[in-house]
Amino acid sequence: MLDATKVAQLSFSDVYLGHPVLGDLLADVPGAGLNPLRAGASLREDLDRLTQVCRQTRDASIAAPSFKVAHDGAVYRVSVLPAAGGEVFVLRRIEDAIRGLAETGIPSAYLPRLMDRDLSGLFIISGAAKAGKTTTACALIKARLQEYGGIAVTAEDPIELPLEGAHRDGVCYQTPATRENGGYAEAFRRCMRWGAKTIFVGEIAEREIAAEVLQASVNGRLIISTMQAGSVVKTITRLQALANERLDPGCAQAMLADGLAGVLHQRFASSASKKLETEFLYLKDATAARASIRQGRFEVLTSEIRQQVATMIVENATFRHVGK
C-alpha cells in the first residue's frame, strides 16, 4: 500500500492536499501504524495532478467552499480548508453508484416501515460525519421511486451521489444548494414549487432550513434530510433548538410532534469493519411518542425506541417464517 502510485488504489477516510509545509496526508488508512499517514514519494505525481484538478475546479466554482471532482476513475467531495500556512483541499471519496436499500446495512426489520407507501412528513437520517447518512438517504429515495414511482427533487451542497435519472417508473432531479444562490433554505423553497412528492435536503445544520422543513412537514410530502447528532433523542433536541431560533418555541414543538415522520440514527462500529449500528424511531401511528414530543419529554423516547425495535424484530421473524 505504501508503494501505491495512484490515490485511487488506496483506502482512507480523507486526503489533505496542498499544505506547503505539512505536505499531503492520508487519514484513517487501514493497517497503517500512523494516523495521519504522510504520502509517499511514489504518489507524488498522482497527488500533484489531483491537486491541480482541485484548484481548477475551485477556480471555476467562484471560490465555493465545497465541490466535487473526478480523477482517475474515482469521485471525491472536496472541502477547502483555509489554513494559516496555506490553502488545503480535504478530499473524501464518494460512491459512483446508489446502493440498494438492503445493501446499506440497515436491519431488514426496519425496511417495511421505511418503505411504507403512505410515509409522509420529515424523515431524518442522523449520525456523525462519515457515517454514511447521504448513502442511506439516496438508497431510500431510489428504493421508493423504484417501488412507487413519482417525482423526487433534491437540494444538495454539493451534489454527491448520482441519483438523478429514471428509477423504473420514478424520476429524480438533483439541484445544487449553493450559498451564492441562497443556501439550503432558498433551494428548499424552490423545491416546494416544483410539485414533487419527495424532497431530499442534503443537511439540516442551520436555523433557516430547520424552520423551513418543519413548517413544510405537515403538508403531505415526504421530506428526507440528514443531521449530525449523537442519537435519535439528540437529533430531535437539536432540530427543535435550531427551529426555535426562527419560530415561536411552542409552534416549533407542535410542528415537530405533528410533522416528524421518523429518525434513523446510524454509526459505524469501527472504521475498519464498517458494520452499521442503528437506532430507529418511527412516528407513524405512534400516538404516545408524538405526545411525548409535544410535551417536550424527549428523554422518554428511548423506551419507545426499544419497544418499537422489539416489535419490528418479532414481525420480521414472523414474516420470514410464514414465507418459508
Image: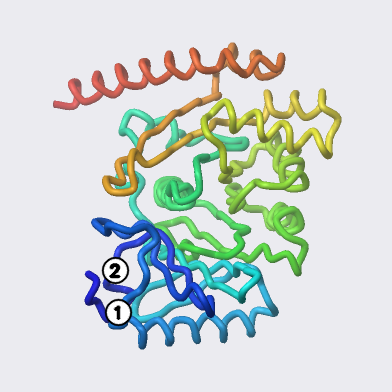
Q: Residues within 10 Å of mark 2 (few under 14, many from 20)?
A: some
Q: How is the image coloured?
A: rainbow
Q: Residues within 10 Å of mark 1 (few under 14, many from 20)?
A: some
Mark 2, secondary structure of its residue: loop
- Residue 210 place in picture, x, y as percent: 72, 42
- Amino acid type of the residue tagged 2 in the rendering: Leu
Image vertical order of residue 323 relative to residue 290, above or below: below
Disc 1 to disc 2: CB gap under 8 Å: yes
Q: Nearer the viewer, residue 111 or 205?
A: 205
Q: In which image quadrant can residue 55 be found? A: bottom right
Q: In which image quadrant can residue 174 be found? A: bottom right
Q: Nearer the viewer, residue 22 or 95?
A: 22
Which residue is depicted at the point 53% across and 34% down?
Answer: 230
Which residue is depicted at the point 49% across and 13% down?
Answer: 303
- Amino acid type of the residue tagged 1 in the rendering: Lys
User: What is the number of the mark on residue 6?
Assistant: 1
Q: What's the distance in space between the residues labelled 1 and 2, CA to CA? A: 7 Å
- Residue 260 place in picture, x, y as percent: 62, 30
Question: Quadrant location of the C terminus?
Answer: top left
Mark 1, secondary structure of its residue: loop
User: What is the number of the mark on residue 241?
Assistant: none
Q: Nearer the viewer, residue 72 or 30?
A: 30
Which residue is depicted at the point 59% across and 11% down?
Answer: 288
Residue lying farthest left? 324
Question: Quadrant location of the N terminus?
Answer: bottom left
Query: Which residue has dot 2 on it?
Result: 10
Horizontally, residue 62 falls left or right of residue 81, namely: right
